[in-house]
Image: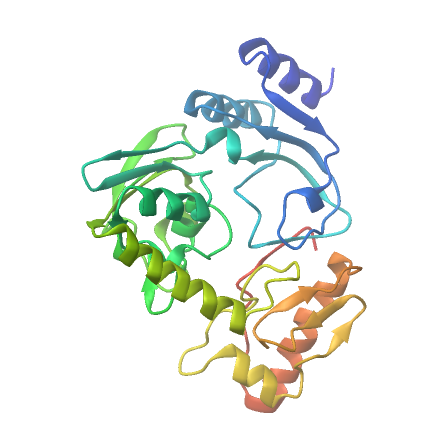
């Protein structure tokens, strides 16, 4: 038998009923709605299942990738020769003790926002419209409107490469701009604990509504994208640099630098992943020639 066959046999013997999809298009699992098939996509529902999958990948020397909602991924049209472990709806419980909210990493940010509204807890409003899951948000220290996950994070439960469950404080996580120690050490985020503040339901809803209205005015939310395509360079903003380089509205195939917000590259409906990749490279080249600033992608480029 092949390594994959041994892997699947062991997995199904120890985790009967676990969701395993073969040659699953990654376009179904990314916010860009792009990407070719991965070898297998698995959706575990418990920490023990996650640990077992990763252990078996090591045992049979198989490459794997852990994803959440795929909101920061651009996967090539050729797909991925990997096992993709998706921490999504099957791993998305949210609970509350006093003002401490604990969310499994697959919980979507919008779900957590609604949970906070219902439980009269403030502090997460800025993240209500950030696409993706809390695991991804913590992994990259996502932020908006001068706030970030590090402002409210108390503790992060992770799985290290040795299969050990470890706990990191906010300080241990070494948060920076779109950065955390989880990236540096390849840790798998299992749970995120957020320390929030009591407030009236109406006040919280009003803040969420204000942020939502602002996003709809300024961002191309009606098109598939990965949110902000580029990181903010020191001393600059990516959007104005892209505008000044004459790139706003420019298309490569079905990919376009948004006419609404130059910091977004969007899938207008018929883009390929290669179109988006080529447009990212073109924007980098034009901005560098115009301003001397090399933009770094915020979106992760996989399989190129």
Q: Quadrant of the N terminus?
A: top right
Q: Residue at x 47, y 45 (%)?
A: 133
Query: Would residue 56 appear left or right of 142 to someone viewing this image?
Result: right
The answer to whether residue 141 shows anywhere in this view is no
Image quadrant in which you'd find residue 299? bottom right
Q: Residue at x 26, y 35 (%)?
A: 96
Please say which color scheme the image uses. rainbow
Residue furthest top in the image = 13
**Residue 32, relative to residue 168: is it above or below?**
below
**Residue 31, relative to residue 291: is it above or below?**
above
Q: Depth check: give the residue in front, 161 or 188.
A: 188
Image quadrant in which you'd find residue 5? top right
**Residue 17, relative to residue 138: is it above or below?**
above
Which percent across, then down, holds residue 298?
52, 63
Image quadrant in which you'd find residue 20? top right
**Residue 283, relative to residue 80: is it above or below?**
below
Which percent across, then down, holds residue 283?
65, 77
The answer to whether residue 16 shows anywhere in this view is yes
Q: Depth check: give the residue in front, 247 or 110.
A: 110
Count of marks, rendered view: 0
Which percent across, then down, holds residue 92?
44, 34
Q: Residue at x 72, y 35 (%)?
A: 24
Which percent across, then down, holds residue 304?
70, 55
Residue furthest front in the image = 202
Query: Would residue 115 appear left or right of 129 to someone viewing this image?
Result: left
């Amino acid at each position: 038998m092949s390594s994959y066959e041994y892997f699947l046999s062991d997995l199904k013997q120890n985790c009967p009923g676990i969701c395993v999809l073969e040659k699953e298009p990654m376009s179904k699992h990314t916010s860009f709605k792009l990407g070719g098939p991965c070898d297998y996509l698995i959706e575990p529902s418990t920490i023990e299942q996650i640990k077992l999958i990763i252990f078996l990948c090591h045992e049979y020397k198989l490459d794997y990738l852990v994803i959440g909602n795929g909101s920061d991924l651009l996967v090539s049209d050729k797909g991925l020769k990997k096992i993709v472990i998706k921490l999504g709806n099957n791993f998305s419980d949210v609970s509350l003790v006093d003002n401490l909210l604990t969310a499994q990493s697959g919980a979507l940010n919008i779900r957590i926002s609604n949970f906070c509204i219902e439980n009269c807890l403030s502090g997460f409003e800025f993240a209500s419209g950030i696409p993706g899951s809390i695991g991804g948000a913590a992994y990259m220290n996502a932020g908006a409107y001068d706030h970030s996950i590090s402002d409210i994070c108390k503790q992060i439960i992770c799985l290290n490469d040795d299969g050990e469950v470890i706990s990191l404080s906010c300080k241990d996580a070494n948060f920076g701009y779109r950065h955390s120690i989880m990236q540096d050490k390849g840790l798998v985020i299992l749970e995120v604990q957020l320390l929030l503040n009591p407030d009236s339901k109406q006040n919280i809803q009003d803040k969420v509504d204000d942020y939502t209205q602002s996003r709809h005015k300024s961002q191309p939310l009606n098109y598939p994208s990965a949110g902000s395509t580029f990181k903010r360079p020191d001393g600059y903003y990516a959007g104005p640099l892209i505008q000044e380089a004459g790139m706003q509205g420019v298309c490569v195939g079905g990919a376009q630098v948004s006419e609404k917000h130059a910091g977004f590259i969007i899938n207008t409906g018929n883009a390929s992943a290669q179109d988006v990749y080529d447009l990212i490279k073109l924007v980098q080249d034009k901005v560098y020639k115009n301003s001397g600033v090399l933009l770094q992608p915020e979106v992760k480029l996989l399989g190129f």
